[in-house]
Every structure is written in C-alpha cells, then in structure tokens.
Amino acid sequence: MADPAAAPEQLLAADGYAFVPALRMRALLGAAALERWDGFASSWDHLGIDRYMADGGRYRRRRHAVFAAGAAGFERKPHQPHYQSRDHNALNGGIERWFTPVEDQVATHPVLLAILSACRSLFEELTPPGARPDTWHVELHQFRIEPSGNEDGHPTPEGLHRDGVDWVLVLLVARENIASGVTSIHDAQRRLLGSFTLEQPLDAALVDDGRVYHGVTAIRPLDPALPAHRDVLVVTFRRQ
C-alpha cells in the first residue's frame, strides 16, 4: 500500500490514487473554513431518497449539484440530471437521473468552497498544461448509505467501477454504528493496487479515474437495533 504520509500529488502521480488522512486534509483545507464543519456535516441529515436504484434498494440518500470551475472561481450551473453510460455504471447507468438539489447554503458553505478550491489546485497541477481546460465540469454528490437491521448498505452498488471523469475526491463526513466499507483500488486489468478504510471525518480518497478502478465493500450495522449510516461527499472534475 502507498505511504499515506507522502504528499497527495506525489501519490496520485505515481499510483493513480491517494489515501489522505484527516490530519492532512485539515491542513489542506485550512482551520478557518473548518470552524463551521459541524453545520456543513449536519446537512447530510436532509438528503432525498435515491429512487433510481436498479437493485430495488432504498438504502441510499443523496443530493446533487453541478459547477463550472475556472480562473474566476466556482459558478453553480442550473440544476441538471446526473448521467453515466452503462459502460461506467452497469447497474444504474444509461438514463438521466434527477436527484434532489444540494441546498443553497451547502453550495456556498466555506467548507465546500475550501474543498473545491483544494481539488482544483491539485487536479490542475496534475493535468498536463496542454490538456488543462479553461473551465472544468464539476459534479458534487452528497451520499448517505443506511444499512438497517440485518440488511447491508452498498456504497458502490455497481461494484468496481470508473466514473467516466478525470478526477475524483471521496471525503468521509461521518460513520455511525457501521462495520466495513473498505475502499479498494485496482489497475486497468482490475488487479488490486491497494485498500483502506475511511474511518475519521475528513479522511479522503483521491482517484485518477482514467487510470484506476475503485469500489467500496458493503456496510452493515454494528448494532442492528440502532440507526447506522455512512456519509460521504463525492466531487468529480471532468474536462469539458
């Protein structure tokens, strides 16, 4: 497994992925933005049910937003569907999926703006100068996976996959009463490169989507009698 103490940009360049511990993410985002972390994290209590699950599951809640990222900063685009081809999502792809929009106060929150800025800085640095777009297409997903009783929840029900973008950030917001949820990274031949578990709020995975596949194992409640959830923020950057 890659050394988590190494700089994220070095790991991404060398291996196509990076596990970034919470302490390092805090340094990247800055103390000022994170002073309002609790309010940002609490927005995961207000997500809509994902009604596009082809497996019939009702264990996933989410909100979605789209931004344009350029030299002038980040501009939210009009609400639009999320679309993935079936090549990238064999379970739920091939259709336009209209999710509940991200709330305005979340889309303009200092924590989110710090995350987006850190991502743009990192991803621009790792994109060859001739391939850097004037404007990135950025998608933001708030996910909550809720296993219940003896039923698992599936963070990546489509299995091992690529997202069909250039770069991906997966940031843990909260884990409550759950076991497992192991992230695995695989090369183009689907051979395992490494695995880790996002355990602490702000633990993160960074992925070069063109180079590697990623997936997350099912989660289950530690105590089936109590509520359980795994909250993550997923941010993707794609060249227009």
Image (spheres, rainbow, N blue to C red):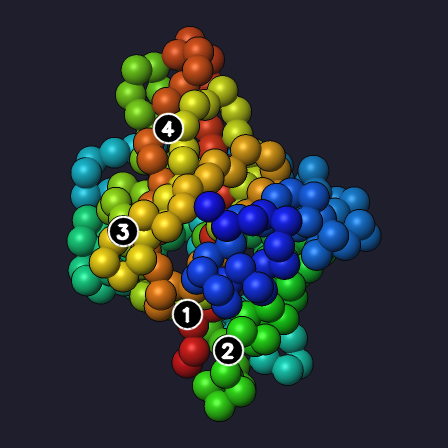
List x then y, in percent, for residue 232: 50, 43
Q: Which mark is residue 219?
A: 4
Point 51% across, 38% down: residue: 198
Point out the tag, 2 or 1, that comes first from the N-terminus. 2
Residue at disc 2, secondary structure: loop
Q: CA distance from mark 2 to mark 1?
A: 9 Å
Name which of mark 3 and mark 2 comes first in the sequence. 2
- Which of the marked residues, 4 or 2, is nearer the chain's N terminus? 2
Q: Amino acid at mark 1?
A: Asp
Residue nearest the viewer, comparing 201 with 48: 201
Real-space Cα separation, disc 4 to disc 2, in angstroms: 34 Å
The residue to which callout 1 is attached is 166
**What residue lies at 59% left-to-right and 75% top-to-bottom?**
125
Q: Amino acid at mark 2?
A: Thr
Q: Which mark is residue 140?
A: none
Kindly indicate whether the residue at mark 4 contacts the one at mark 1 (C-beta within 8 angstroms): no
Mark sitting on residue 191? 3
Q: Earlier in the sequence, mark 4 or mark 3?
A: 3
Judge depth for marks 1 and 3 and give the one in front.
Answer: 3
3 and 2 marks in contact (CB < 8 Å): no
Q: Nearer the viewer, mark 3 or mark 2?
A: 3
Reading the image, the residue beneath label 2 is 127
- The answer to whether residue 95 of the structure is visible from this angle is no
User: Can residue 59 be seen in this snapshot?
Assistant: yes
Q: Vertically, is 144 above or below 5? A: above
Does label 1 or label 4 sit earlier along the sequence? 1
Q: CA distance from mark 4 to mark 3?
A: 23 Å
Q: Amino acid at mark 3?
A: Arg
Q: Residue at x 41, y 33 (%)?
A: 181
Kindly indicate whether the residue at mark 3 contacts the one at mark 1 (C-beta within 8 angstroms).
Answer: no
